[in-house]
Amino acid sequence: MAVPEVLRQLSRRAWEPALARAHRAAFLMDAPSAEALHWAGGAGELLAAGALAVSALSAEAAVPAGAARAVFVLSGTLRGGAAAAVRGVLERGAVRHCVLLCGDEADGGGAAELEETLRRWMGEGGRAEVLLRGPPLLAPVSAELCLLPALAALLPPLPGPGGPGPAEVGLGALPAEVRAAVRALVGELDSLFTALGLREESFAVGALSRVVAAELASYASARNRRRAATSKASVIFVDRTLDLAGAVGHHGDNLAEKILSVLPKLPGHKTDVMVNMVELTALQTTDETCNIIAPGCLAQPNDPAARALWESFMNLKQKEAVMEARRHLVEAASRENLPIKMSMGRVTPEQLSSYIQLFRNNLKALENHCGLLQLVLATVQTLKHPQTSKWDNFLAFERLLLQTIGESEMPSVLNQLLPMIKSYNERTKDDYACEDFLVLLIYIYSVVGEIKGGKELDIAEEKVKRALVKAICDEPEPSPLLQKITGCDSSLNLTSQKATDAVDSIFRSLRDIARVRLHMKQFHSIHNPGSNTHQASYKPLLKQVVEEVCNPDRPDPVDIEHISSGLTDLLKTGFSMFMKVNRPHPGDHPLLIIFMVGGVSVSEVKMVKDLVATRKPGTQVIVLSSVLLTPHSAVELLFASDRLQPDARI
């Protein structure tokens, strides 16, 4: 069976223990678990199995009166905020029987100890059952992409000006919260590879990737698994921070990427978006904030037609994807005998809307094609969205920046940016907002790489900082992203000093971003300066890595480091210095798994899929990551003030 289908089945298998206990149960789950369920099968499956309620876990959450048991689903272990919330619910005394589904603690006392804790919180006569998870909670977003939502906040730390070199970074040198995330990731990957029956060769590009691969190599249960497993795979871990232009750039002509970037996120979700469904109802309102009608979404795990259309959105060019949307809609309307008038030529949002209207008063047709209609509505709303026209402006400006970076020094690149930073009152709808500048700054500093410091650069940066601080302070109300970056939830407490501190911190990080590839020999640059005949271009680090893996000459990779998982590997590596021994190469195996540590973008997933299909046709490829990034979510991941705080409520 193809690996994507196996992963889809695994993502469902993780929920089997929950489904078996769903009858008359009230489910309380944390946000990452809910997100995994959303992509794997949806809460509807729990309700169909007899659950009375499915709700978000919080200490205040209520359990319905007739519930036979409360089932808590945690994406991680029973610690910190999750433990405090479970305890809060149980100590209220309404729950007499509870089930806990959670991850296994490497250093914990196992299920028996956790059951004892739960019984203590419930008080006399309470019954508790603890189920430690087998396969991890996966969100299968597309055939080639699976996410681990529990690790959405993981990002490789940036190297400080005088910080340790990448070779010196071990697990012990990392901040406590990153250490905890690495251990959690290793446990999740081991249980995933166990379920897939894999024996992996691990490779790493970047400092944190090396730590993750080394931890996986020495993880006790992984060693036992590798002895018994028969299927072989190469796993390459890549640090997101080595190429942030790939996360914030507006590269592709990809419909899925635009939908995910411009529509508002579903509450509590990192990936899926809210689709306004008012068009399918008799409710006549143009109010964007009208929330009487529940939103639609992109994840349609139980609707084969909608899933096929979503794969088209992920893999085709925008124009082809929009034509696919029309084709699916026309076929659905024909099947329901709706009076559809076929029109050829260019597909417009208005044309798609007129087709959607045909379904409006036909409840049977609405029910049969609900998933498809949500995806087409998402398309219409994205094509009409003001941010979509801005997308092309970004793309043009990024191309111009690539040209400028090749021809001039950093100060003049920043000086070009300066007049475009406008305050709220001076901006038109086409001008860039404050967070758009942060996107462009990350792009510039990531592409440039090594920067010559000096007085001129300091002056240019200072001017940009001042303009940004003024623009941030002039916002009538800071956007949600600016609130997270400045730590201020309203313009009343956003002082000039707080804005200055936030912008100073951003520029320190930008300097670190420019420094992050200094130690690399082969992947030192992601900028192609161009020539008299060719335009300057961006060459994605991930593309360079995959091309190296697929290189038919199989040279010894320079920056893709093999992480040995035992004595045999070490001996091979040692002997290869003076004997003809084939060292492990990432292109050796029929399955290639790329894990982007810190998030991946839609266009990167498509690029990997296309490259492997053309360069190494017999190889199956899967991209795993912690989160699917859009330009603004990448800014948040880098600069939000509370990104990976240690959980203080332990």
Image (spheres, rainbow, N blue to C red):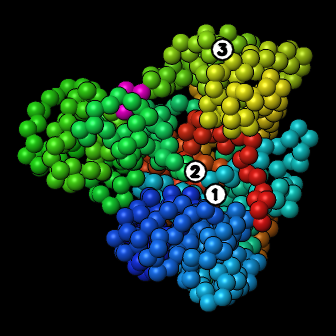
User: Is 85 contained in the magenta span?
Assistant: no
**Mark linked to residue 151:** 1
The residues bearing labels 1 and 3 have C-alpha atoms spaced at a distance of 36 Å
In-image side of 325 versus 132 (left or right) = left
Asked whether the residues under the numbered discs 2 and 1 touch, taking CB atoms below 8 Å apart as contact, a structural biologist would say yes
The residue nearer to you, when weighing 174 against 238, is 174
Residue 432: name its quadrant.
Answer: top right
In-image side of 353 versus 134 (left or right) = left
Q: Mark 3 points at which residue?
A: 423
The residue nearer to you, when weighing 8 against 65, is 65
Please report the bounds of the magenta region as a residue range.
381-385
Q: How crowded is mark 2: few (under 14 residues within 10 Å), some or many (20 or more)?
A: many
Examine the residues drawn in magenta and state their main secondary structure. Answer: helix
Mark 2 / mark 1, whichever is N-terminal: 1
In-image side of 27 versus 30 (left or right) = left
Q: Which amino acid does label 3 sit on?
A: Ser
Q: Which of marks 1 and 3 is in front?
A: 3
The vertical placement of 395 against 28, above or below, is above
